[in-house]
Amino acid sequence: MYYLAPSILAADFTRLGEQIREAGEAGAELLHLDVMDGRFVPSISFGMPVLRSLQSLRPQSRLLFDVHLMIEEPDRYLEEFVGCGADILTVHVESCRHLHRTVAHIRELGSKAGVALNPATSPEVLKYILPELDMVLVMSVNPGFGGQSFLPFTLEKIKEIRRMADEAAPKLLIEVDGGINLETVCPVLEAGANVFVAGTAVFEGSITENVKGFKEVFARWK
Ligand code: DX5
Ligand code: ZN
C-alpha cells in the first residue's frame, strides 16, 4: 500500500478546513503537519492551537494526523502534541540526544513513532532501533520551507533504509518529504518508499485533480 500525505504548509490558510476536507475526499490518507520553531529550522510555521482546532475536522474526515516536528528539544512537547491528536509523531534524529528514550516515550503516550533524517544524515544511526520505529521520514530537501527541489542523492538513502527494513522491520513505513510531485514520485517509489508527503504538488491548482494524479500513479505501481 502507498499513502499520500498532503502537507498543509502549502495550503491557503484562509480556507484551511475546506482544503483539508477536499484532499481527504479525493483520497489522501494522511495529513502532514509541519511544526517549525525558528531554531531547528530557519522558519516558524504553526503549533498546538492550529492542530487543536483541526481536531474538529475528525468526525467528517478519516485523515490521520502525521505530525512532523522540526523543533529543538522535542521531548518538552511530546505529551502536548499527542494530546493535540498526533496519530504519528515524528522527531528529527538531529534534535534528539537520547533518541531511543524519545521514541519509547512517544509510543508510551499512545502515538506511532517516526524518526526523520536530514538529507546529510546517514541511516546508520537507526540501525539498533529500527524494530522500535513505526516510520522513518527521509527528508529529500533541507527542512524549513515548502516548494524546494527534490535532492536526487537521497534516493540511495531510501534504498538503503528499504534494505534495512526488509531485514529488521518489514512493517516500517518509509516516508519521503520534500519536492515530491508526479515526476519525482516515481524514482522514490522505485527506491522503496511507501508514504509520500506533497505540499505544493497537492495544494497548487486543483486539489482533487492533484490527489487523483498521485493515486493513479500508486494504482499503476502495484
Ligand atoms: C519542509 C517540510 C515539508 C514541505 C514539503 O521542511 O517538511 O513537509 O511542506 O513541501 P513541498 O512538497 O512543497 O516540497
Ligand atoms: Zn514535513
Image (cartoon, rainbow, N blue to C red):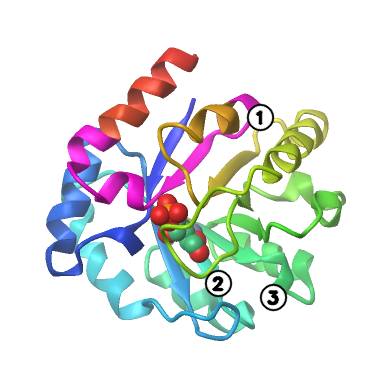
Kind of residue at disc 3? Ser
The reply to whether the magenta stretch includes residue 198 is yes
* Residue 100 placement (x, y as % from top left): 78, 64
**What is the CA distance from the residue labelled 3 to the residue labelled 2?**
8 Å
Q: Secondary structure at mark 2?
A: strand
Q: Is residue 67 visible?
A: no
* Residue 11 placement (x, y as % from top left): 25, 60
- Residue 160 is tagged as none
Kind of residue at disc 1? Ala
Q: Which residue is mark 2?
A: 70
Judge from the rendering whether residue 137 lies leftward or rightward of residue 93; answer left or right. left
Quadrant hosting residue 155: top right
* Residue 126 placement (x, y as % from top left): 80, 53
Question: Badge 1 local density, few (<14 within 10 Å), some, or many (20+)?
Answer: some
Q: Which residue is mark 1?
A: 191
**What is the CA distance from the residue labelled 1 to the residue labelled 3?**
26 Å
Q: Which residue is mark 3?
A: 95
Q: Is residue 94 visible?
A: yes
Q: Range of the magenta residues?
A: 190-210
The reply to whether the magenta stretch includes residue 74 is no
Decide: is 82 above or below 147: below
Decide: is 40 above or below 152: below
